[in-house]
Image (tube, rainbow, N blue to C red):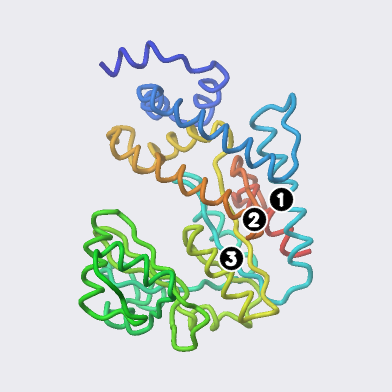
Amino acid sequence: MLEHMRETVFVPESITKTLRAQYLPQVVNAVLTNANYIKGLQEKWNQLVHGLAKAFSVDVKDMDEEVLLREIERVSLVRIQDFIGNSKNVVMGIVGPGGAGKGTVKGEVSSALDATTIINSTTRDRRPSETDGVHYHFITGEKIAAGAVLGDVARKQIAEDLGISSVEARIDDKVLEMLESVGEKKGEYYIPLDIAASDCKYVTLMYRSGRGWYGVSKESIDATGKDRFVFMEENINNLREVSRYLRSSNDVARFFVVCVLPPQPIAFHSAARAYVRDGADMPLEKLQSTIGPRQMREFEDLLKYIKEVPMVFLANDDLIDIDGKKQTRVGQELIKALRQ
């Protein structure tokens, strides 16, 4: 059946040629085997990129999709340079779909600019390779609950989700346990916090199915207030809350989102990179969880807040040689923009 699928789905020769030039044959074959699924994602990515072009006032007429993404990158970098100016505290939230290379770009920029990282808190079990205070602050659910304060809107929403009459501003152990059950069913559960409350210790709080609670504390953010460049990894909904908190608590900081994308065709490159990382025999179900609907929704959320949160979009398309060391083109472009 898979062979039949490969034969009946048309993949433009330009895409096939690009894949064969950059990836091993077994990776290309894996991509072509699942071309039906990947092609559907690609059509959605094209629509999203066109929406992005509109947001940045980039004319898409007669412009190749790959060139269009690079033009969006150029325009967004110029805007970010103007936005950060001479700020002494630049905070960057980094996002991007699976296979984009955001970890590589973050590491490259952090190394060049001696950037620090805001450390998130979590209740999930610590892995053997992880260090408390370096990868995460590993804490208990009780500690997170003690530091969370709910506003009126959140209290009403949570009461509805739990099917109870009311919820206090403070989350007790019973409510925390009930929220975890809801989170297991939904996959992810966000809790809007009253970050203006002085006794609210967290800016963001969410539950991830099979993992646990994740939060970004005010203390972790404030600890980087004197650092020139700061990174943090979160989804856009949480980064939006961090942006709100910084605007209210730090009139020096400049916060923006760095979105790292594979080059066009995004879905095909994402799939190929996923197969490189996880093996060409990776089942379709895992590919779908890596580059599928969740990533599309996250990018759609990104576009919702593009007028509220400054953003730069990088098409991670090439490696360049600098003093015998391979670097990403987009990493170097971001470094130049930050060093202005």
Number of other residues with Cα within 10 Å of mark 2, as a class: few under 14, some 14 to 19, many 20 or more: many
Q: Is 322 positioned to the left or the right of 242 in the image?
A: right
Q: Of the residues under marks 1 and 2, which one precedes in the sequence? A: 1
Identify the element where label 2 is drawn. Answer: strand
Identify the element where label 1 is drawn. Answer: helix
Between circles 1 and 3, the one closer to the viewer is 1
Residue sticking out furthest to the front: 165
Q: Is 74 positioned to the left or the right of 155 in the image?
A: right
Camera-side residue of 211 and 187: 187
Say which quadrant the N terminus sits in: top left
Residue 24 image point, x, y percent: 43, 29
Q: Amino acid at mark 2?
A: Met
Tell me the quarter of the picture where residue 173 sits: bottom left
Tell me the quarter of the picture where residue 59 sits: top right
Q: CA distance from mark 1 to mark 3?
A: 23 Å
Q: Of the residues under marks 3 and 2, which one precedes in the sequence? A: 3
CB under 8 Å between discs 1 and 2: yes
Report the residue at 35% width, 74% height from top: 131
Report the residue at 57% width, 51% height from top: 304
Dot 1 corresponds to which residue? Answer: 76
Camera-side residue of 324 and 130: 130
Number of other residues with Cα within 10 Å of mark 1, as a class: few under 14, some 14 to 19, many 20 or more: some
CB under 8 Å between discs 3 and 2: no
Report the residue at 38% width, 74% height from top: 121
In the rendered structure, find residue 111 and report the number of the disc placed on it: 3
Residue 123 image point, x, y percent: 29, 72
Q: Amino acid at mark 3?
A: Ser
Classify 218 as above or below 158. below
Dot 2 corresponds to which residue? Answer: 311
